[in-house]
Structures are given as structure tokens and as C-alpha cells.
Amino acid sequence: MSARVIDGRAAADKLLQSLAERVQELDPHLVVVQVGDDHASASYIAQKVKSAKAIGMRSTHKHLSATTTEKELLNVIDALNADDDVTGFIVQLPLPEHLSGIARSVIERIDPRKDVDGFTAINLGKMFQGTDTELLPPATPAGIIALLEYEELDFVGLHAVVIGRSNTVGKPLATMLLNRSATVTVCHSRTLDLPSLTRQADLLVAAVGIPQFVTADMVKPGAIVVDVGIHKSEGGLCGDVDFASVSQIATAITPVPGGVGPMTVAGLLRNCVRAKEIQLSLSKQAKSR
Ligand code: GUN
């Protein structure tokens, strides 16, 4: 059997097109802060800027030098928080080595109303409470959920196994799946007898950050497999899933590239539109007091 390849680009285009009209009405402005010259970050940011442009959204790439100090970065964040022309912004991760230890405090400095990455404790906490308060959820998990909804997957009762426990993907995705009544198992690189768990998955999500980690023997025949990884390999890009063997076993699988990546960008831009809506409704409330 050969799995159906899930087209993340088509799903992302559909989501982006659904945003275009609201973008025209609301004129949101996204700012992406990059510190230093991480190669992969540069290409992710280029995608974000390109997709924003495609739907008429203003975006600014604010590129700071690799020697930016903690104080300078926090000052930039404070200025973006205070700038009424900025709807939402993100600080692209990873930060350079000398700032990597303060990533959490950098994120917490972002005004939650402008946190379009959905990484602040406030937005993660709201996501934790349930679907009705998932206002600005992290872009990658939100993109994965939207991709599976595009595939018309019914989450209720299915066994989802997430490999990976990061704050940006694994943990929030597990929460969003639980919010949709999936039964969720979270595993990671230290899990004992991982294949015995992954083989139970109706939906298997690989976000472990290890190239081609998931092999066919770890997958239940007929499973849906979502690959969040992206790595450079000799033959080009590859994911956390060994696509060649797993696509013989799964019923549907996301490719790398062209799977989760475009949906992450779409999730971010959707958050930017939502951030503008939230800000407008808050300012209306304040005026009516
Ligand atoms: N680096 C890789 N993915 C992401 C993301 O979704 N947001 C940020 N800020 N940095 C990233």
C-alpha cells in the first residue's frame, strides 16, 4: 500500500486565501525579529514575509546583529509592544548562543496581545483551558490541527501519539488534540520501548528533531503520519520520518517539504489577523467604559 501524500501547500493556500479579505479590512502589520544569521531562520522568515505579501499583509523583517545584547533585544521588544502600528511580532528562534539562556524571559517580555507565536504563558494558558479560549495558539500545532481539519479528520476518540515534548510543538499540540477529544500519548527521545507506543497510534506526529527517526516498524498499518521535522540531508531536505518506508504502511502522510511547514506560516498569519481583532475589540470595550 502506498499512502496518500497530504498537500500542506494546498491546505495553506486555502487558509491564507480565507484570510485575505480580513487582511484588507483590518490592515494588520507583522514584525519578525531576527537576531544573528542562523541560516535556517533566514529561510523560514523569507517564507513568512512572502506569504504575508501574497495575502496583502504588511510585514517587516527586523534583522539585528549577532552581537545584540540582552538589553538591546529587550528594548526592541518594548518598542514593538508600544508601537500602535505593530499588530503582532515574533522573535525568531533559536537565538544566538549568548542569548539562548534568556529565550524564555525574552518571550515573556512580549505583550500577549501581540504574541502571534502564541508562546507566552498567557496564551499557552488560554490554550490549555479549551478550544473556545485558543485565541493565539502556537503556530505549528495550530497549523497541524488546521491541516488535519482540511483532511476532514475526526479527532474524537482517536489515539494520537506525539513524539516530542517541546514547548513550541509537542506539548501544545498534545493539549490541542486533547481539547478536541483525542486520546493522547506524549513520548520523546528518552521514552522506553517507544515503538510499542507509536504502533498504537491512529495519528502519529513526529516532532522529535532527529532525521528519519520514525521507521516503518514503528507505525501501525493505516495510521496517519504527520512529520514536523525538517533537516538537510545528502538527498535534499528530510523530516523526522523515513518517508520511503513509512509511506508503504501509513494511509496518509505529510511530506517534507510541503507538509507542515506551509501550515506553520499560515497559522502565524491567522494569529496576526486574530491579534488585530482582539486589539480592536479590547479598545472598543475600553471606550465604552
Ligand atoms: N523557529 C522555528 N520555528 C519557529 C516558530 O514557529 N517561531 C519562532 N519564533 N521561531 C521559530
Image (cartoon, rainbow, N blue to C red):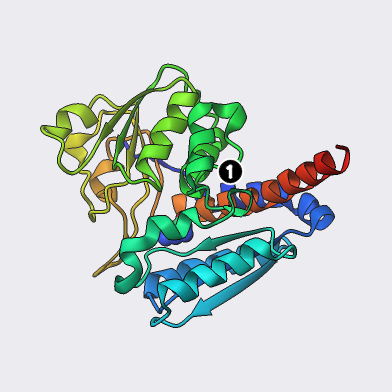
Q: Residue at x 46, y 20 (%)?
A: 181
Ligand 1 quadrant in view: bottom left
* Residue 119 drawn at (x, y percent): 48, 49
Residue toward you, 144 or 106: 106
Q: Left or right of 84: which side holds 179?
A: left
* Residue 178 drawn at (x, y percent): 43, 25
Question: What is the secondary structure assignment of the residue under circle 1?
Answer: loop
From this viewpoint, which residue is outermost toward the top?
A: 157
Residue under circle 1?
136
* Residue 44 drawn at (x, y percent): 47, 66
Residue 86 shows up from this direction: yes
Q: Left or right of 263: which side holds 27?
A: right
* Residue 60 vertical position relative to residue 159 in the rendered view, above or below: below
Q: Residue at x 72, y 62 (%)?
A: 57
Are there few (<14), some (14-19), or many (20+) residues within 10 Å of tag 1?
many
User: How many discs mark residues in the rendered view?
Assistant: 1
Residue type at numbered disc 1: Leu
Residue 46 shows up from this direction: no
Q: Left or right of 200: which side holds 267?
A: right
User: Which quadrant of the view contains residue 61?
Assistant: bottom right
User: Which quadrant of the view contains residue 132?
Assistant: top right
Residue toward you, 178 or 83: 83
* Residue 97 drawn at (x, y percent): 29, 72
Q: In which quadrant is the C terminus drawn?
A: top right
Residue toward you, 278 or 208: 278
From this viewpoint, which residue is outermost toward the right?
A: 288
Q: Residue at x 48, y 40 (%)?
A: 124
Q: In which quadrant is the N terminus drawn?
A: top left
